[in-house]
Amino acid sequence: MPPAPAESQGSGVRSAHLYLSPFAPHRWLTAAAVIRILIILMAMTNSFTAILPRHPFLQIFIFGTGFICLGWASYLLFLQGRRSRLPVLAVWAQIFLDLALVCLVIGFTGNIKGASTYLLLLVVFEAGLFLGVVPAVFFTILSSLFLWGASYPWPAGDLDRLFHVYDQTLIFLCLIAIAFISGLWNFWLNRMAQFQRDVLDRMNNGFLVVDPNGRLLGMNQAAERILGCSADKCMGKPVETVLVPEAGMECPVLTALKKQIDYISHEFRAVTPSGTRVIGLTTNRISPSDHRKEHLLIVSFSDLTEMARMREEVQRHAHLAVLGELSAELAHEIRNPVTTIRGAAEELARIPETGELTRRLAHMIHRESEHLNSVVGGFLEFSRSGQITVWDPVDVCALAMETAEACRYRFPEGTIRVEIIPEGTECRVAGDPQRLKQVLMNLLNNAMEAMDGRGEAIVRISRSGNALEIRVEDQGPGFPPDKINKLFEPFYSEKPRGTGMGLSICQRVVEAMNGTIQLGNRAEGGAAVIVRFPSYEASDGLISSF
């Protein structure tokens, strides 16, 4: 079986079967392998019937070599059937075996001028086409040396010897011509293949070539980078094992093959070793030149993960803009009853007959009313400007303890604990204390409501380098994994009577203070919200810019 052309150094569309050569299609290689096996069997059968009685040793030698050639050709046919890559050493080994078999046939017939001699032209042509000019010349020299040796003893007469030299020289010139012609084809085919690889490797988009059975024939460097896999490991595998859709969906490449349709800018999520990516995919079928029904499929795709993230960010800001408009309308409606509650609490505290407990509760009502009024006003200002206007040093530990104390009165059956790891950690950040208290209050309320007000919520404050981390943990059911990405969306809530504004407000406040907020579930059960801020010392440059 003529082996596949050896790949030149360099990367690109790496494939064992896809070449620009007209001699390289898979069906031609398979047919050539079958024909070679039949020729070997016929030669062995002929030698068995012709010379077994006269030359048993030569017969055994021919049979042994024939079986080796037959086994090797069958092995390469097996590799071709599985679309495995044929190494360069296998090409050399196959041509050496072909040369040995042809030489044995010529030696067996004893006629160097017979039809068997022309098989050497095929061997040299094979070497030039698949290995290049130099290897083809090498096999030409070996063939010529064999012919000179096989013709020994040479003719005794001067004229006969002259004709013999003429015949051998003519055969050598024919072989060397075939070597250069086939080697030149190999050179230009490799140049074209290298040009193809260079062009595809300079593409930013991933590029795949898939056969009608859904097996991968080629991929460029961009595809390797996006999918996080090596071409050497992926070649010949089913495309659905390389381009893996999220959530068990069918690979769109297989869908295009089954339904004989092409996708245009189709977006889907693919699972890669580096995480889930948003892929934009376009397919295009290539019709064979011989009008067969089978089509190769060209797949061009790009990584749209960052674009999708930006698109989601724009949508989120649009939702927050709606929230800002709504807050402007509600702010005045909220401030009026808050002012009334605060005035009633002040009057209650001034009554001489009021007991100590009532005075303390009235003071708390007044304090929280002031806080609510400040939150409403600040949120209204924040929804309009999108920036934090107050950048003061905030003691997060003291603020967390104050918030926890206020939350305990709302959930008397629960427990709220504040942990500072380690004790005495510097807990200052730069920002607006009222906004940060609003964030902590929302997170603690969510934690206690998730436990129906009866479990334990923990606020853990720790510092790592120039970052301060606040973890609010509970013992509730945790966040639904399939909906965790939606919880920051305005007006989205899993609570029966929730407004869906709490986490959205928290996220915008935290991001405005140069922080990050992340939702997750604890291994031992329950939810965890992680908020990180740059420490006050690390925020000096940021503060000076506002």
Image (cartoon, grey):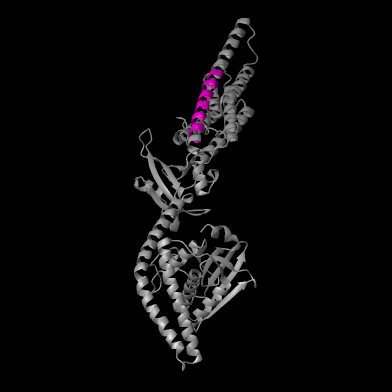
Q: Residue at x 44, y 75 (%)?
A: 372
**Front residue (pair 400, 462):** 400
Quadrant assignment, res 374: bottom left
Which residues are drawn in magenta? 176-197
Q: Judge left or right: residue 466 versus residue 17.
A: right
Quadrant assignment, res 75: top right
Q: Is residue 374 visible?
A: yes
Q: Judge left or right: residue 394 versus residue 217.
A: right
Q: Is residue 411 visible?
A: no
358 in magenta: no
Residue 543: horizontal and vertical position, in percent?
Answer: 54, 60
Residue 116: horizontal and vertical position, in percent?
Answer: 53, 22
Residue 178: horizontal and vertical position, in percent?
Answer: 53, 20
**Front residue (pair 430, 80):** 430
How many marks are shown on the rendered structure?
0
Q: Residue at x 37, y 78 (%)?
A: 337
Q: Judge left or right: residue 485 versus residue 143.
A: left
Q: Residue at x 49, y 92 (%)?
A: 355
Quadrant assignment, res 262: top left
Q: In the image as oriented, which residue stretches furthest toward the bottom?
A: 353
Where is 376 relative to 22, above or below? below
Residue 279: horizontal and vertical position, in percent?
Answer: 44, 50
**Front residue (pair 178, 466):** 466
195 in magenta: yes
**Front residue (pair 372, 8):** 372
How would you classify the magenta stretch by its main secondary structure? helix
